[in-house]
Image (cartoon, rainbow, N blue to C red):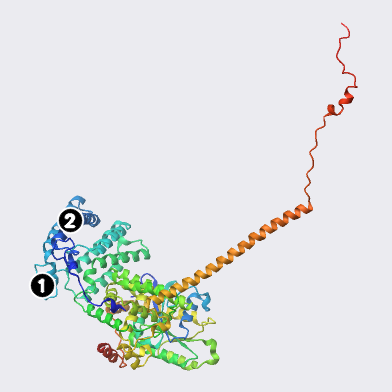
Amino acid sequence: MAAGGTGSAKSFNFKVVLLGEGAVGKTSVVLRYVENKFNEKHISTLQASFLTKKLNIGGKRVNLAIWDTAGQERFHALGPIYYRDSNGAILVYDITDEDSFQKVKNWVKELRKMLGNDIALCIAGNKIDLEKERHVPVADAESYAASVGAKHFHTTAKLNKGIEEMFLDLSKRMIERQSEDTHKSTTTSRSNRTKTVTIVDDEPEQPSGGGCCGSS
Amino acid sequence: MTSKKKKGFHVDESELLCKNGCGYYGNPGWQGFCSKCYREVYQKAKDAQLESDSLRKQRLAALQGPAVTANGETTLKFNKFEEKRKQHQAPKAKTVKTLFKKGSASPNKEVPHPWTGKRQPSIESEKAASDFIEFLNTLRKPAAQDITKQCKALIDRLQDQYELSVEEQSDIVQDFYQNMGERLQTHSAFKGASAEQYETMMEHMEKYMITRLYKILFCPPTCDDEQKDLAIQNRIRRLHWISAEMLDADIDSTKPSVIDYIEKAQTDIIEMNSGRSPIDKLLCIVRCSKNIFQVLNISRGQPASADDFLPVLIYIVLKANPPQLHSNIQYITRFANPNKLNQGEVGYYFTNLCCAVTFIENLDAQSLSMSQEEYDSYMSGEVIPAGTKFGEPICEGLRLMYANLATLDELRIRQDRLRENALSLQQEIKDFRDSVVKTVQDVLTTKPFIIQQPRMPANLDEENAAESSLLPPPLKPEVVAK
């Protein structure tokens, strides 16, 4: 998709998905990046679920489309629909909440399973302004990120630290990937195109759901 | 709620008869006329239509083949068209039979297949064609010719090969988009156009071609889209008891403006079915999403993230139960330009709709965070949720009451303000009068007004009348000497 003809026009269109549990500050991170605002009163946009940002990296024009995803547990199974064909993913967790880090691990596993190494990953430990209440050790997070081929960043939307760097680094890595294998990605996009995403729930929920809708 | 409307199927005898009142039975295929009356009534309209069609053909032909003298080319085209029309009219009476035959596997070579291009274009494709020609007129000639040629080739190809499976059709269309995208970049006819122009060209081509092919491509009989449409429709009907609260959708439905936007969003998502091209359908989804953001903005007063957006979208889909939902989604996935679908806002909202539908399909007790027993009792209809508790817009009357109360409140406030203003105006008038009176009094006391008698002009002679007699007479001139 993005590879189709975009490489030759010297401008890159990237889709970046934003994954993270509810209340880890996904929205604040992206609003800080795109609008450079933290306080909700000053934000002009109606929505923070789809935002775009134009960048210029070494003379290359980059258009980022940032897709927010619903992070509630009940929507977990919908992940593959959101992140299909994405070039990059930012996984956000709250450093004061160990559970949210566990969720990030789940998503990484899924992303690697579905998209392989085609996707550039960033893990963001958000809310470092609350360092005192930290529950996720820095060493753990960083070593985990390194083990799955992702980059780890310490961010805070409130104090605006680490966010700009994270998006810039992600963009650079996406450009590298795309220029590396333009021919490869065109072939994959051709085959991806007709593929429809099917969601396979490995929990035994589906038969029960099907049973009761058939019975009544 | 929706099930109430579809209580039963009842048709009056009078509805079956010909609208012309000739006593024969009518047919919806002939707009409710019997075959004879239909032919009489519509012959005139059809003639007029043919006239305009031939005009349009002439214009298209002029673009396609400038080498051939315009006159010869067009008459040839027109003759062909007349022929086609005759062919088309002859089997018209058999249409009903052919429709029934369509399902059977043995294709009768003599009866034209109902899905081929040999049919009158619908109003929508007429409009798409005229829009397209208008657009082509804005382009330079070689570019317009090339586009017409390519589009025509694709339309003909798909119309001729009606036995293709929908996946193959999709592949053909997608290949076309890819090739055309490359062609626009490299072909000499399109040199010097900006990226936006390429985009509008692609958009117009997509709109025109897919609208023309709508009948063939939308929910084709070769796939099981129709069953899936029905399945999802029934599924949504079964889930009618789900409230916004259960989905954690942040809707403040006590506010009338919120309900307005919810209704608008529902209308938009239902309208999706009436759009012909994927772009039209996608625009309906975008409008629906924008209305949802309005709902969230009024309810919460801060920018909505996907965490807030998706539950409301699911709620809207559940309440609206859009017709042919599955078919529409499949149609867009198969035939929309992938560059548009995978990137950009449009793609994002479409993806969310897909998520909502998937969620509804797989919904269970867990996804509503309730116990299995509770879920089962709702599903079997044993328990009816107390929907009104959270201001659920269940009852139209209640809703109207809320709206009226709000209006009355506003009216009262305005009335109070009016009264206040009137009183203050009255006070001001009084003050002004008093101040004027006071000023006048003040002036009168400090500077009393005294009227002086006017001075009478003195009559010198009159005053001294008595004395004048004593005076010597005035001297008279005398001649002293001659």
For the residues labelled 1 and 2, say whether their Cβ atoms are less than 8 Å apart: no
Amino acid of disc 2: Lys
Residue that badge 2 annotates: B77
Residue A29: numbered disc: none
Side of B39 relative to B465 (left or right) = left
Residue that badge 1 annotates: B107
Observer able to see residue A25: yes
Side of B480 relative to B91 (left or right) = right
Picture layout, residue B30 above or below residue B472: below
**Residue plotted at (46% across, 83% down):** A26
**Residue plotted at (20% across, 69% down):** B158
Q: On the rendered image, what quadrant is the N terminus of chain A found in?
A: bottom left
| Disc 1 residue crowd, few under 14, some 14–19, many 20+, Cα 10 Å | few
Quarter of image, res B361: bottom left
Side of B76 relative to B139 (left or right) = left
Nearest to the observer: residue A39 or residue A14 = A39
What is the chain letter for disc 1? Answer: B
**Residue plotted at (29% across, 69% down):** B274
Picture layout, residue B364 above or below residue B265: below
